[in-house]
Image: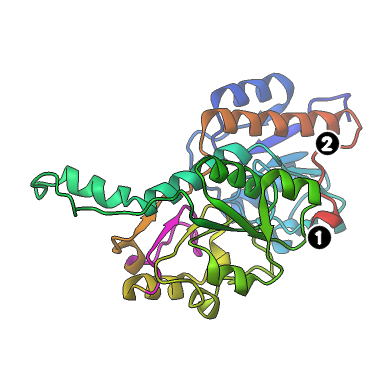
Amino acid sequence: MSARRLSVVVTRRLPETVETRMKELFDVTLRDDDTPMTADALAEAMANADVLVPTITDQIDAALLGRAGDTLKLIANFGSGIDNIDVGAARERSIHVTNTPGVVTEDTADMVMALILGVTRRLAEGLRLAQSRDWTGWSPTAMLGGRIKGRRLGILGMGRIGQAVARRAAAFGMQVHYHNRKRLRPEIEDDLDATYWESLDQMVARVDVLSINCPHTPSTFHLMNARRLKLMKPEAVIVNASRGEVIDENALTRMLRSGEIAGAGLDVFERGHQINPRLQSLPNAILLPHMGSATLEGRIEMGEKVIVNIKTFADGHRPPDLVVPSML
């Protein structure tokens, strides 16, 4: 396929350096505005392009893939997650799917620690007070938060990001506990000084901070449901910079309102950008607009991975970040 420049369609605006490099290598169609493409626009792109570069905001389901043209042979996702793409349906049409794993690990782990500190030290409440006209000055009993040194951190999902969070938490003096689909190898567990819990219920009931770091799959949908949330200590907090669907957001909102959970720091939500208004009104919840991986360095690295995947495919080789069935 290297005899001609591949036709590549990019669905969202990317960093300028990434777009410039794509224009040098491919016959690329870029977006002028940074808004999600409609389903019809995606279908038109897939009907004519060799390669589609979508993001998490593009839902590439079986019906949309059914409208793809014979020329479409690669979907090079700009992002590590692939739950926005029906990979099975793509494979049935001999369309390869790639992603950008590993790039967001450090940035997301930084954000998890920011949320842990933000919730336990009540940073959002303090910011609002300082920016209002209601602050009358320092008081020994005002805005009391909690010390994180010595607290138990429970990590749900001990992949790359979970392990990066564990290392940061240890530096802050937190005790690291985790639940994972598979237990870590002993040498990794020892290096992280992490305690494994086979029972998620038992871990949730004993930790002071719970960090969600697992992907969204059918088995993790509402993994933190109302029953499991009620196992948490009333003074515990929960943070999520992974996937919003893992938490039953309505149940969490009710428990935050009633004081059954002390606080929450959320960078992702069950219904994307449509956040529950009752959740938005809570003083003990820090809500961020999906900023976990939002660093310039990270976005450029993601773009570079996309380019490498496309270029390798164009040269007739297996892309380094090809998504295979064992990953699903």
- Which residue is labeled 1 in the image? 88
Question: Going by the image, does 3 lie left or right of 213?
Answer: right
Camera-near label (1 vs 2) is 2
Residue plotted at (71% across, 63% down)? 63
Q: Residue at x 89, y 30 (%)?
A: 1
Quadrant where the C terminus sits is bottom right
Q: Earlier in the sequence, mark 1 or mark 2?
A: 1
Q: Distance between the residues labelled 1 and 2?
A: 19 Å
Of 291 and 42, nearer the camera is 291
Query: In this view of the protein, which residue sits in the foreground, 268 or 260?
Result: 260
Q: Residue at x 71, y 32 (%)?
A: 305
User: Above or below — where is 73 with respect to 90?
Assistant: above
Image: magenta residue range: 260-277
Q: From what the image shows, is residue 274 above or below residue 1?
A: below
Question: Mark 2 is on which residue type?
Answer: Pro
Q: Is residue 291 visible?
A: no
Percent coordinates x, y for residue 78 in the rendering: 65, 40
Residue 21 makes an appearance in the image = yes
Disc assigned to residue 320: 2
Mark 1 surroundings within 10 Å by alpha-carbon count, few (fewer than 14), some (14 through 19), many (20 or more): some
